[in-house]
Amino acid sequence: MLTRRHLIAGLACGAALPIGIRSARAAAPFKQPPLPYAEDALAPTISGRTVNLHYGKHHASYFKTLNELVPGTRYADMTLEEVVKASRSSEADRKIFNNAGQAWNHIFYWEQFKPGGAKAPAGALKEAIERDFGSVDEFKTKMVAAAGGVFGSGWAWLSEDGGKLVLSGTPGGDSPFAGGKKTLLGVDVWEHAYYIDYENRRTEHVKAVLDNIVNWDVVAERMA
Ligand SMILES: [Fe+2]
């Protein structure tokens, strides 16, 4: 379980990265960080059964595969973040990118739901959302639409580009982070993220996530 002491110690390290991301900075073999809460902590928005499979099987498998792929490659001594960015444009290393990207994306994902914290955007984050989307409700509507527009498996993202907040969708394990953008929030829209709880109702799931389980303090920390 993460504590405030961990948070402060993490911040003292310098980089404005969430805790889980920092804990994954060591080079291969990469270690999946612990889930920062109990498996049923996100219920009923995301059931304990979904988290059990999503974290324990899907996320874990990206680490397992990545650790099988990187020994002996130019990625062996890189941090996870470096592997994601360095492999993104290499067609030959597509499998490494997909698994490293998914390993990183899911750390980022679990971290933003840490129980506690703000239940709605506030302060500078709220102002930036209102500036670039009109209102928090309008932002949520647009993010749900972005998530609905991702064809097949992928992610919907809130990121910052040129001082402006932007929404995007990416396929597979890609992300704005992989492309060098400051990334604030990511919603997994692979079916494994929601099918047990919402069947095919992807947008209903994304709306429930945005309304109920995002820790907006984490998002604000990422923007700061
Ligand atoms: Fe996932």
Image: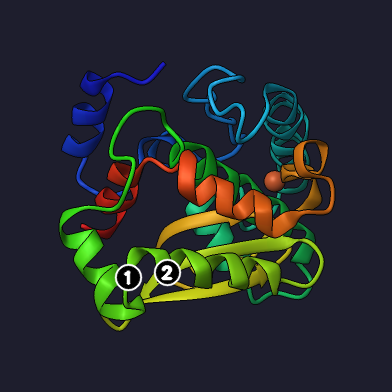
Quick check: 201 left or right of 184? right
- Above or below, 111 against 127 in this view is above
Report the residue marked by disc 2: 139
Front residue of this view, candidates 86 and 146: 146
State the residue at coordinates (75%, 24%).
49
State the residue at coordinates (30%, 69%).
129
Q: Position of residue 173 (x, y in %)?
A: 68, 60
Quick check: 170 left or right of 140? right
Front residue of this view, candidates 21 and 31: 21
Mark 1 and mark 2 in contact? Answer it, CB < 8 Å. Answer: yes
Q: Position of residue 79 (x, y in %)?
A: 49, 48
Quick check: 201 left or right of 215? right
The quadrant of the rendering that contains the N terminus is top left
Residue at the outermost bottom position: 162
State the residue at coordinates (78%, 41%).
65
Measure how far apart labels 1 and 2 are at the Cα level.
6 Å
- Above or below, 77 against 223 in this view is above
- Above or below, 4 against 61 in this view is above
Q: Can see residue 77?
A: no
- The coloring applied to the image is rainbow
Front residue of this view, candidates 22 and 122: 122
**For mark 2, does the 10 Å Cα neighbourhood hold few (<14), some (14 to 19), or many (20 or more) residues?**
some
Report the residue marked by disc 1: 135
Question: SS class of the residue under badge 1?
Answer: loop
Which three-letter amino acid code belongs to the residue tagged 1?
A: Ser
Which three-letter amino acid code belongs to the residue tagged 2?
A: Phe
The quadrant of the rendering that contains the C terminus is bottom left
Question: SS class of the residue under badge 2?
Answer: helix
Callout 2: CB less than 8 Å from ligand 1: no
- Above or below, 83 against 65 in this view is below
